[in-house]
Amino acid sequence: MNTEEIQSSSQASNEISHNHQNSLVAESPRAATGSSSKGINQNKNVCREDIELVQNLIERCLQLYMNRGEVVRTLSTRAKIEPAFTTLVWKKLEEENSEFFRAYYISLKLKSQINLFNQLLEHQSHLMKSSVLPNTPVAPIHIGMDTKTGNFFQCYL
């Protein structure tokens, strides 16, 4: 597998950062393990190096906050690793590191909520810009504390 093939298949996972994605797979599993061109796990003889390679690639994906589906698709398209093999290694990592994965899944949910919040803010911004009519007064946005009531008015932009 050459660099052009790796980069051309990167469009399969638009959710991850392109800067990090290009460095995700530094070498082909075939080059590292001598496996056939069909990819890992089709040879039926999986060696320890194959498992370690997939584990290392999964760990790189975890640093990019990818979920299991994204990891499986990315390793399948970019490194030609069988999805079933990636899933098997993922499950083994989950069993061995249950506390880490519990926290990791919470981080994934938080990432999803932040992305949704940012999309909603952007949508609201577009709506506010397009719906302002000429000569229509706009209510001021208060940021800070109302000293009379003690209430906080905050704007999260």
Image (cartoon, helix red, strand yellow):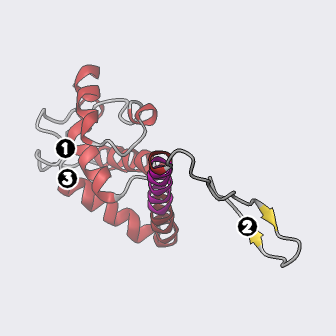
> Which residue appears at 77% of the width and 70% of the height?
152
Residue 106 % position (x, y) = 49, 68
> What is the residue that sits farthest to the right in this orientation?
147
Prevailing SS of the magenta stretch: helix
Q: Say how many tags the image has.
A: 3
For the record, the magenta segment spans 112-128
- From the image, tell me which residue sits under label 1: 40
Identified by mark 2, the residue type is Phe
Identified by mark 1, the residue type is Ile
- From the image, tell me which residue sits under label 3: 83
Residue 58 % position (x, y) = 38, 50
> Which residue appears at 25% of the width and 20% of the height?
4
| Depth order, front residue of 23/94 | 23
Q: Is 63 displayed left or right of 39 in the figure?
A: right
Identified by mark 3, the residue type is Pro
Mark 3 element type:
helix
Q: CA distance from mark 2 to mark 1?
A: 56 Å
